[in-house]
Image: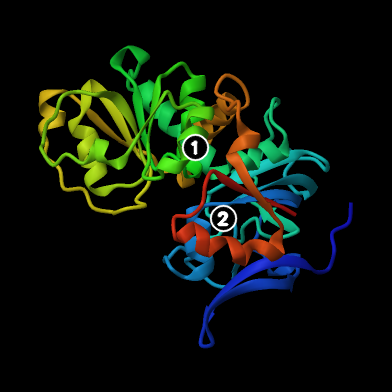
């Protein structure tokens, strides 16, 4: 298959003319080097994408770059023998829209070392409804299980439950056999949260305590917001439970004490999805395609847009108005 001399992409600039982004024509020669070229089928919109596209966060390390930290599509050219024309592949994180061009283009050039063959059990569309958000939620579970988390410790709490990572975590955790409690400030989304896996929906006041230790209420959980809610979740976690930290929607700070760690043996696990080692990355995607595959992907995918509609999505996401996942179809 031949590739075009030019194609559409959502590109981000920062120079003497200012910070700006939008659709433009680019060529493969303008993209970061890589062994695998794909025709893009889907990407997604993550909070990090909104920060990068608008300049609200310092995400990109060089300019200009095509945005989009997720991408999935079919190989059209490869200099690496592991990939052949027509193969379905995906990449999440791994420097996309940070140090190299990302998935918001009709074509993408990828490093073979990070390209994951689409696992049997997932379509390209499903893989990008999952994307970085689903991979992050599943990586959190992977890390918790590796540290002996079990359903017998009690329910897992998920903060920021109506967002992309939170929504997919509810589905993935419940699929893996855990009782899951959603923590959300959006009371009007209770029915949605219960439909995708939450056995209980609690308001933010459930994690409003400021004391260093509270009655153990949760077996552990996944925190997407940071700040006081993370400190409160640690204070309410059962002995030898695990809390995975994956986001900072509310705050990058953590004003807590060591008491949950030294009295109850609670573990705080970091979840850094972008740079996950290849072997773990492959293992997590195999789980996502099989025993941890969410049962409600179509419900969690609440919006589908094309490249031209991307600028409409970012402000809503930054303002906290997004529910579930936004899929980009190219």
Determine crowd level at label 2: few under 14, some 14-19, many 20+ residues with C-alpha closer than 10 A: many
Residue depicted at 78% across the width and 38% down the height: 87
User: Is residue 248 depicted above or below 264 in this figure?
Assistant: below
| Residue 291 figure quarter | top right
> Which residue is tagged 1?
167
Q: Where is residue 206 in the image (x, y as percent from the top left)?
A: 26, 35
Residue that sits furthest to the bottom in the current view: 16
Q: Which mark is residue 208?
A: none
Residue depicted at 60% across the width and 30% down the height: 296
Dot placed on the residue nearer the N-terminal end, 1 or 2? 2
Front-most of residues 305 and 134: 305
Determine crowd level at label 1: few under 14, some 14-19, many 20+ residues with C-alpha closer than 10 A: many
Q: Is residue 54 left or right of residue 286?
A: left
Task: Evaluate whether residue 276 shows in this view.
Answer: no
> Which residue is tagged 2?
96
Front-most of residues 147 and 292: 292
Say which element carries label 2.
loop
Residue depicted at 35% across the width and 15% down the height: 150
Q: Where is residue 201 in the image (x, y as percent from the top left)?
A: 39, 31
Task: Evaluate whether residue 95 shows in this view.
Answer: yes
- Colour pattern: rainbow
Front-most of residues 275 and 323: 323
Q: In this view, does 141 lie to the left or right of 232?
A: right
Residue that sits furthest to the right in the current view: 1
On-image quarter of the C terminus? bottom right
């Amino acid at each position: 298959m031949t590739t075009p001399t030019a194609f559409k992409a959502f590109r981000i600039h920062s120079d003497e003319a200012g910070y700006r982004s939008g659709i433009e024509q680019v060529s493969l020669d303008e993209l970061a080097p890589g062994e695998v070229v794909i025709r893009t089928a889907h990407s997604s919109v993550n909070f990090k994408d909104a920060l990068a596209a608008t300049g609200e966060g310092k995400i990109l390390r060089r300019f200009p770059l095509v945005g989009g930290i997720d991408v999935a599509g079919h190989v059209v050219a490869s200099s690496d023998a592991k990939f052949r024309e027509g193969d379905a592949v995906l990449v999440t994180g791994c420097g996309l829209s940070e140090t190299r061009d990302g998935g918001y283009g009709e074509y993408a050039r990828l490093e073979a070392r990070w390209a994951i063959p689409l696992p049997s059990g997932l379509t390209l569309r499903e893989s990008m409804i999952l994307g970085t958000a689903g991979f992050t939620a599943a990586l959190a579970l992977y890390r918790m299980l590796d540290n002996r988390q079990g359903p017998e410790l009690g329910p897992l709490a998920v903060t920021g439950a109506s967002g992309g990572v939170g929504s997919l975590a509810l589905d993935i955790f419940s699929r893996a056999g855990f009782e899951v409690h959603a923590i959300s400030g959006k009371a009007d989304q209770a029915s949605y949260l219960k439909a995708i896996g939450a056995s209980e929906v609690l308001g933010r006041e459930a994690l409003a305590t400021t004391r260093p230790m509270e009655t153990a209420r949760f077996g552990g959980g996944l925190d997407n917001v940071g700040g006081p809610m993370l400190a409160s979740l640690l204070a309410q976690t059962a002995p030898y439970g695990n809390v995975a930290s994956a986001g900072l929607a509310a705050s990058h700070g953590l004003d807590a004490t060591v008491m949950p760690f030294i009295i109850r043996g609670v573990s705080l696990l970091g979840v850094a999805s972008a740079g996950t080692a290849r072997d773990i990355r492959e293992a997590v995607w195999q789980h996502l395609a099989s025993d941890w595959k969410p049962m409600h992907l179509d419900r969690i995918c609440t919006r589908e847009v094309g490249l031209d509609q991307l600028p409409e999505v970012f402000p809503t996401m930054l303002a906290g108005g997004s529910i579930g996942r936004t899929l980009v179809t190219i």
